[in-house]
Image: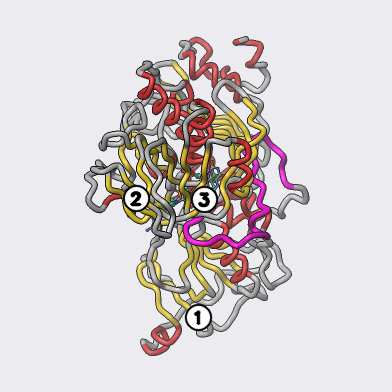
Amino acid sequence: MAAAVTGGLAVVGGGISGVTCAEQLAAQFPTDNILLITASPLIKAVTNVRQVSRVLEEFDVTERCSSELEARYPNLRVVRSAVRELRSDQKRITTEDGGEYSYSKLCLCTGAKPRVIVTGNPYVLGIRDTDSAQDFQRRLCDTRRVLIVGNGGIAMELVYEIEGCEVIWAVKDKSIGNAYFDAGAAEFLISQLQADKAATPLTCKRTRYAVDALTGGKAVGAGSALGPDWHQGLNLQASKEFSRCVHVEAETEVKRIFLQEEFELLNMTALPSPKSSSSHSSNPAEWPVYVQLTNGKTYGCDFIVSATGVIPNIEPFICGNKFDLGGDGGFRVDEHMRTSLPDIYAAGDVCTASWKPSPLWQQMRLWTQARQMGWYAAKCIAADITGETIEMDFCFELFAHVTKFFNYKVILLGKYNGQGLGTDHELMLRCTRGVEYVKVVMQNGRMVGAVLIGETDLEETFENLILNQMDLSSYGESLLDPNIDIEDYFD
Ligand SMILES: Cc1cc2nc3c(=O)[nH]c(=O)nc-3n(C[C@H](O)[C@H](O)[C@H](O)COP(=O)(O)OP(=O)(O)OC[C@H]3O[C@@H](n4cnc5c(N)ncnc54)[C@H](O)[C@@H]3O)c2cc1C
Ligand SMILES: NC(=O)c1ccc[n+]([C@@H]2O[C@H](COP(=O)([O-])OP(=O)(O)OC[C@H]3O[C@@H](n4cnc5c(N)ncnc54)[C@H](O)[C@@H]3O)[C@@H](O)[C@H]2O)c1
């Protein structure tokens, strides 16, 4: 039983948001004791932060022992146990190992967990942390066919990376990657699924993730979310020798899942391999699990990955505490990262940004936002203690995300999909098949968003054009003319 600790600043969660918040508090209040409570044995560390442009940033992330963090910040203590209960009326936290901790101010950074289509089915997997990624890799070794449900970041990464087995990709939308792309960009990308994988992975400006922990220490309990390049530490080659083999079932959802016995009892039939002309076809009645889709098709497979978004981890904190929750189930936070309860803040995947956002920013549960929110929450806590006023950080002015899909560098800026703009916007496109896809979203002659796929080198210029809201009407289509050096135009 851990002793009760009284009084100071406490953070819950050893992911990017929690560690960034705790580090910032420890640096800002060097004579105070800062407590970081986390369920995961390893904590995240952000290193080599590089500002690519005013808003776009890249950094490396590693998983480290908590002792390294304590060595760097002598006033920071890490408790490795999950929080079991919060008594906000007494400003007290109880952990699974029986520890009791009181706090003056608390920041909740407990991340999220996969929102799987069904729970309790051993053939349905969600991927979030080291443990679940290892489970996935183990199963993939002798897999002949996997069915992937979902159309966001994880599904896009998996369909591109998995080799040596059939992949059936069930998406409920008309086109692939709807969390990031419109149909045009999806069309541009999908040809890559048929192409051979590039021999050398693309090196591009994006956050990197060191995955030592995937092959090393075993995580226990709720781990932190994996992140960019998480699959590079894994072997995603199944048993067969062939390369990528993806079949997309669009505009469909999972209606029912049957285990083999049930399927046979009901005397049901499944479709053969969608690539049945190839040598990968197999007896339709030999699968451990079967998926009936709403389009009437039924496929057998070895297992199902449900890459269908996340649910914020709020459970241990809600019993007896009247938090305001967002529509997505996160703790609603105001412009100072304060929840609805006194002296309790939240940051990262667990929170729902509920301030009036800048017209060019939206919350997405991403690594950069987790870091920015953790850092800003610490600043807000400090300002509330010292009585200083604090303005919303500049990083919340413009949404900016650098990532990689299908071996292309992908940059998303502002209202990149015209989010919330209704019909009051226009699109301008430039596309060279297999090379680049550039889309800008214009409203009243001003640029409000952009999707840049490939090595376009347009990110800084477009970021500036979006931030300064210059009237670009007079440039018309020439804005995307590849023969005009747009950087010279506006520098
Ligand atoms: C497979 C995968 C790939 C991704 N790829 C990208 C990408 O390419 N780019 C990108 O920007 N984002 C990506 N993300 C999203 C990104 O990883 C998350 O948005 C980000 O890591 C969230 O950080 P966080 O600190 O809020 O939460 P987490 O990293 O989930 O950390 C939560 C922490 O809270 C702890 N915790 C939970 N419950 C308790 C409790 N009761 N008591 C104590 N501690 C608790 C956990 O142990 C953990 O340490 C990816 C996510 C996944 C799953
Ligand atoms: N490169 C990246 O930026 C990247 C990569 C991987 C993951 N991530 C992040 O990790 C988290 C988890 O990733 P994810 O891919 O699970 O989530 P996501 O939010 O990116 O995508 C979820 C997808 O599932 C679909 N969906 C939801 N419910 C469904 C249902 N019942 N049936 C079928 N489809 C359904 C949605 O339409 C959406 O396309 C997200 O926060 C994501 O932003 C980011």
Query: What x and y, as percent, mark residue 366?
Result: 49, 41
For the question of whether residue 371 can be seen, the reply is yes
- CA gap, disc 3 and disc 2: 15 Å
Q: Nearer the viewer, residue 46 or 197?
A: 46
Query: What x and y, as percent, mark residue 310?
Result: 41, 52
Instruction: Let me know if residue 203 is in the magenta part.
Output: yes
Nearer to us of marks 2 and 1 is: 2
Instruction: Identify the secondary structure beneath mark 1.
Output: loop
Q: Is residue 444 left or right of residue 184?
A: left
Q: Which residue is mark 2?
A: 314
Residue type indicated by callout 1 = Pro
Dominant secondary-structure state across the stretch colored magenta: loop
* Residues tagged 2 and 1 counted as in contact (Cβ below 8 A): no
Q: In the image, what residue occupies the spot 63% across and 43% down?
A: 68
Respond yes or no on whether mark 2 lies under 8 Å from ligand 1: no
Instruction: Let me know if residue 41 is in the magenta part.
Output: no
Q: Which residue is mark 1?
A: 288
Vertical arrangement, residue 199 with respect to residue 58, above or below: below
Callout 1: few (<14), some (14-19), or many (20+) C-alpha neighbours within 10 Å?
some
Q: Which residue is mark 3?
A: 225
